[in-house]
Amino acid sequence: MVTILMPVYNEGASIRQTLSQVEQVLGEADIPHSYLLVDDGSTDDTWQQLLLARQELPGLRLVRLSRNFGKEAALCAGLERAGGDAVIVMDADLQHPPRYLPRMVELWQQGYEIVDGVKAHRGREPFFRRWGAALYYRLFGRLTGLSQQPLSDFKLLSRRALEAWKQLPERDTYFRGMSAWLGFARCQMPFEVEPRRQGRTKWRFSALLRLFVDSIIAYTAAPLLLVGVMGLVMLAAAAVLTVQTLWMYFSHQAQTGFSTVILLQLFIGSGLMLALSVIGLYIGKIYEEVKGRPRYLVQEDTDALLPVDPR
Ligand code: UDP
Ligand code: MG
């Protein structure tokens, strides 16, 4: 029994089409399944559409968050509730094509605990974005020692992997990286990313930048080490400069040295600020974690014994 988990945010126009396609593929492949869809505080008619879809698919469990908490939080809400022997996480916009689902299940039945969807092609994307993503995965892999493959959130987790994932207590999650961290028998399944049919991507540049910083900070303290290395390099340079300056002074060749001082000030000043901001980022994360707020709040859950508000 496989649970299909999708985070859904403002996909009202396409969500039912997505569901019917998935249903068709799984029906043809004869895979026993159920659905768990998490509405991440959509502002369009997504929730109504989901309730309608539920009339056709009685095995559809719906969870609605109290506001938009972001995809990661929506995923957490789903993973914590998912039943079944395995869970498949996929996007609700058909960019993770349903035709790969039988293959994933097959790999799982061969004994893999985690099946990673790996983007073979990134679909149609602006050049700088493609390039940025490639650079990012290199950097992420290098810094964290985890995978350098272009990861995606299209994954199958077995019950065992899912239970292990649930033990990770951090508030601020990064699903792609976490499943790489888990280990277990895993395999990769390349897939072609489909172009988005409806609406547009919800990732703005600022959000991507935040994900970039968050993911690195969540998995490695390497930037802190970098600050230390930078300090050492500065110290070495300063030592050389001290010797040189003293030599000049005692050999009566000293210039007024105004520009040198200014340049050094700027250089050291910016170095210090950078170092402080790196440390600050980690402290910020510690603060977030220490506050211990829940990752998300649930407004409605069709499987909880509370009446479902159709609004
Ligand atoms: N999503 C979500 N909450 C958000 C943003 C997105 O649950 O705040 C969902 C969205 O409905 C979709 C998936 O996450 O199912 C991927 O979002 P999107 O297609 O916008 O991202 P992209 O494919 O560009 O990475
Ligand atoms: Mg998408």
Image (spheres, grey):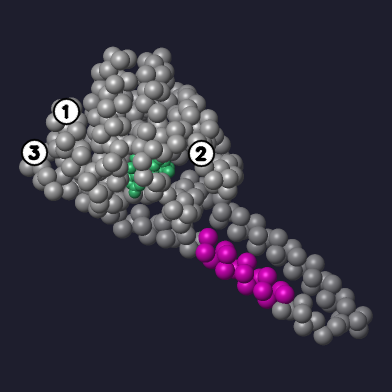
- Tag 3: amino acid: Leu
Can residue 16 be seen at all in this image of the molecule?
Answer: yes
Q: Indicate which disc, 3 or 1, sits on the residue closer to the N terminus.
A: 1
Locate residue 30, reporting x and y percent: 28, 14
- Tag 2: amino acid: Arg
Locate residue 104, reporting x and y percent: 40, 22
Residue interval drawn in magenta: 263-278
Label 2: how many Cα within 10 Å (few below 14, some 14–19, many 20+): few
Image quarter where ligand 2 lies: top left
Can residue 214 be seen at all in this image of the molecule?
Answer: no
Mark 3 secondary-structure assignment: loop
Label 3: how many Cα within 10 Å (few below 14, some 14–19, many 20+): few
Picture layout, residue 41 above or below residue 179: below
Secondary structure mostly taken by the magenta-highlighted segment of the chain: helix
Q: Residue at x 30, y 38 (%)?
A: 14
The residue where tag 2 is placed is 124
Q: Ligand 1 closer than 8 Å to the CB at disc 1?
A: no
Picture layout, residue 238 above or below residue 146: below
Mark 2 secondary-structure assignment: loop
Q: Residue at x 31, y 26 (%)?
A: 21
In this rendered view, identify the residue nearer to me: 175 or 64: 64
The residue where tag 1 is placed is 56
